[in-house]
Image (tube, rainbow, N blue to C red):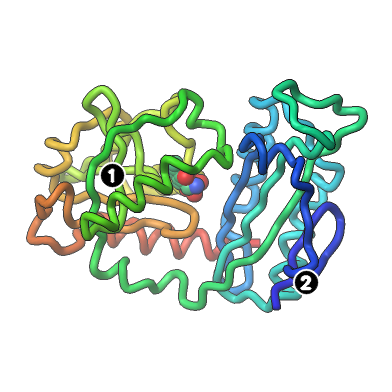
Amino acid sequence: MRTVYVNGEYLPETEAKVSIFDRGFLMADGVYEVTSVLGGKLIDFEGHRVRLERSLNELDMQKPAAFDDLLDIHRELVRVNGIEDGMIYLQITRGSAGDRDFAFPDTETTTPTLVLFTQNKPGLANSPAAKAGIKVISIEDIRWGRRDIKTVQLLYPSMGKMMAKKAGCDDAWMVEDGAVTEGTSNNAYIVKGNRIITRQLSHDILHGITRAAVLRFAREAQMEVQERPFTIAEAQEADEAFITSASAFVMPVVEIDGVKLRDGTPGPVAARLREIYLDESIKAAV
Ligand code: PMP
């Protein structure tokens, strides 16, 4: 049985409890991070920690008392659960005021809830999907206007994933005003020759930690990076497409709305970026 962390305690997962009045449960008033573990070490922990702090600030949410101990808590969960490859899920909510009210509770009396748990995924970096590539559909992006804050409001992305499954595909790219914003749980890219194109950072997309690393590695490898919006039609004509996220790393996209890219097989640029990303991130893991 997994050992999880709740508000200062390490407990068996069946004994961990959060109040029914918790604002994460009632209002999706919470933020989260997912950090990958490869070879028992954390990938880009500092990037996730910095983004978490930003999410809290943007929502005027208090840091939990244990905020400065997060690296130790991550490492302890990896250790006690014997995680070689997998993910650590972390969630902070505004806590429970003991009742339901739209107004934020008094921070003197209501403290944030902090929960972490592990997900064991042996062979996470060698998934068959990375060799075969994934198929995506496009759907309208009807999410709220602060997608740069990593909140637990994931209902529409979940629905998007189900729409993709129903269409026999793996994921959905969301489109707003004719341009792709991002995938349901990842950033979206196309490749044209030596140029990598991905939407620029704004309130419209999550500022992916993997995105930042991959764009840095791409520039270091003398690839050209263009941060701008692109359409589904442009993506369907591109040489390659791929997605990035903390748990998928760099994942090739081989079909968009039923149109195959190349001959429906992953391209060399995505493969190279995946290899560089994994090599460098494992080297820098903590
Ligand atoms: N966009 C969205 C909407 C996401 O949910 C995620 C993953 N949480 C990402 C992008 C990728 O971010 P990261 O590389 O930090 O995992």
Quickly name the residue at label 2. 12
Residue that appears at 36% across and 51% down: 161
Q: Secondary structure at mark 2?
A: strand
Q: Position of residue 139 (x, y in %)?
A: 27, 39
Q: Residues within 10 Å of mark 1 (few under 14, many from 20)?
A: some
Residue that appears at 39% across and 60% down: 276
Determine the image quadrant of residue 22: top right
Q: How many numbered discs, if any?
A: 2
Q: Position of residue 245 (x, y in %)?
A: 44, 51
Q: Secondary structure at mark 1?
A: loop
Residue 110 visible in the snapshot: yes
Q: Earlier in the sequence, mark 2 or mark 1?
A: 2
Residue type at mark 2: give it.
Pro
Label 1 CB, ligand 1: below 8 Å? no
Q: Residues within 10 Å of mark 2 (few under 14, many from 20)?
A: few
Q: Is residue 256 above or below residue 74?
A: above
Q: Is residue 106 above or below residue 73?
A: above
Q: Nearer the viewer, mark 2 or mark 1?
A: 2
